[in-house]
């Protein structure tokens, strides 16, 4: 099976690539060829013995999508995006990357489908930012999309395109509304949600972290481990089971910042919690206040997607995966 990962240099893309080259999918399929693409050079996971191609590519550039898809992969994971805070700060860049780049990819697949009959599976990483405004405390699967940010709007457009191109038979699409990923390893990015990871990640290694929102802020989160498993499961899911609504809200945990902090205290003690500095930021608070706080993802659960059931497990997964099982 030939797999293409767009956004392969990002945290989830990298972890996902490493996972799938070491472990067969649940149906027994193995990755026989790998194409990794991003705006910065991706790295082929160590130990992969099959043919591998790495591409530094910008989907918004003329001809980029054609070059990217020339190997006619069986499964395409579209994980690349300008994140929430940056998309809000730079309106034109957000639409160019998150909308124009996605449409260029889909259009290139459509033309190849019409000419050759090629119909790959496309797994599209969407976001719960497609919801916003005056939503209920717990959002059901049939709730309308009401984004209140440019990023959320761009992702909602991507979902509609995915559904329509799938309906027309150009590809076999499935969209995953990913929760906020926590704890993200590495350095902070420009996502407005970055502090959810920062208040755990930095204190675990003895560094200070800024908390820009109240402790009562509630959000929907899951671990990088779960995100990788969502993508793996989507790769083999029977389209007949998904039906004519290919965009799914993924399961996760609904927790407050205060509950995050208490979980950190439980796992790492008061010394770690002392590194959290409360510095209110009205811009970040406004963006986050427009995001959904909890979901009832019955469709995804029925289709076999699973996530953690307590935040302590998310912290321990980060310690095991990123800190060698040890904390400062």
Image (cartoon, helix red, strand yellow):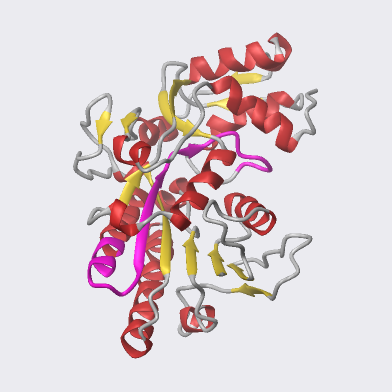
Looking at the image, residue 146 sits to the left or right of residue 262; the answer is left
Residue bounds of the magenta highlight = 162-188
Residue, x 55% and y 32% (percent of image)?
Answer: 195
The picture quadrant where one finds residue 106 is bottom left
Q: Magenta includes 182?
A: yes
Q: Magenta includes 181?
A: yes
User: Could you tell me residue 166's position as x and y percent?
Assistant: 28, 66
Indicate whether 52 appears above or below 224.
below
Q: Quadrant of the C terminus?
A: top right
The picture quadrant where one finds residue 271 is top right
Looking at the image, residue 193 sits to the left or right of residue 104; the answer is right
Q: Is residue 21 visible?
A: yes
User: Could you tell me residue 102's position as x and y percent?
Assistant: 39, 67
Residue, x 47% and y 62% (percent of image)?
Answer: 78
Q: Is residue 190 visible?
A: no
Residue closer to the observer: 46 or 208: 46
Q: Quadrant of the N terminus?
A: bottom right
Indicate whether 140 appears above or below 86.
above
């Amino acid at each position: 099976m030939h797999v293409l990962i767009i956004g392969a240099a990002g945290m989830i893309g990298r972890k996902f690539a490493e996972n799938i080259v070491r472990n067969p999918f649940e149906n027994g399929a193995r990755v026989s060829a790998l194409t990794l693409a991003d705006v910065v050079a991706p790295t082929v996971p160590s130990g992969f013995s099959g043919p591998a191609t790495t591409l530094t590519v910008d989907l918004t550039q003329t001809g980029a999508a054609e070059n990217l898809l020339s190997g006619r992969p069986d499964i395409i994971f579209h994980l690349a995006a300008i994140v929430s805070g940056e998309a809000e700060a730079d309106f034109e860049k957000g639409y160019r990357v998150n909308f124009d780049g996605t449409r260029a990819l889909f259009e290139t697949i459509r033309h190849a489908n019409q000419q050759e009959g090629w119909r790959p599976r496309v797994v599209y990483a969407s976001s719960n930012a497609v919801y916003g405004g005056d939503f209920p405390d717990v959002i059901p699967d049939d709730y309308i999309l009401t984004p209140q940010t440019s990023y959320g709007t761009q992702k909602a457009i991507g979902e509609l395109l995915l559904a329509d191109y799938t309906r027309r038979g150009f590809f076999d699409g499935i969209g995953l509304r990913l929760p906020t990923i926590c704890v993200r390893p590495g350095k902070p990015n420009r996502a407005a949600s970055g502090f959810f990871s920062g208040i755990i990640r930095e204190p675990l290694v003895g560094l200070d972290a800024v908390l820009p929102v109240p402790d009562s802020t509630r959000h929907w989160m899951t671990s990088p481990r779960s995100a990788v498993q969502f993508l793996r499961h989507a790769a083999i899911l029977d389209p007949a089971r998904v039906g004519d609504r290919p965009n799914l809200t993924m399961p996760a945990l609904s927790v407050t910042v205060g509950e995050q902090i208490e979980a950190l205290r439980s796992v790492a003690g008061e010394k770690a919690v002392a590194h959290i500095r409360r510095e209110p930021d009205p811009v970040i608070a406004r963006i986050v206040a427009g995001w959904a706080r909890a979901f009832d993802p019955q469709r995804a659960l029925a289709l076999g997607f699973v996530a953690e059931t307590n935040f302590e497990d998310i912290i321990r997964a980060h310690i095991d995966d990123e800190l060698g099982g040890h904390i400062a």
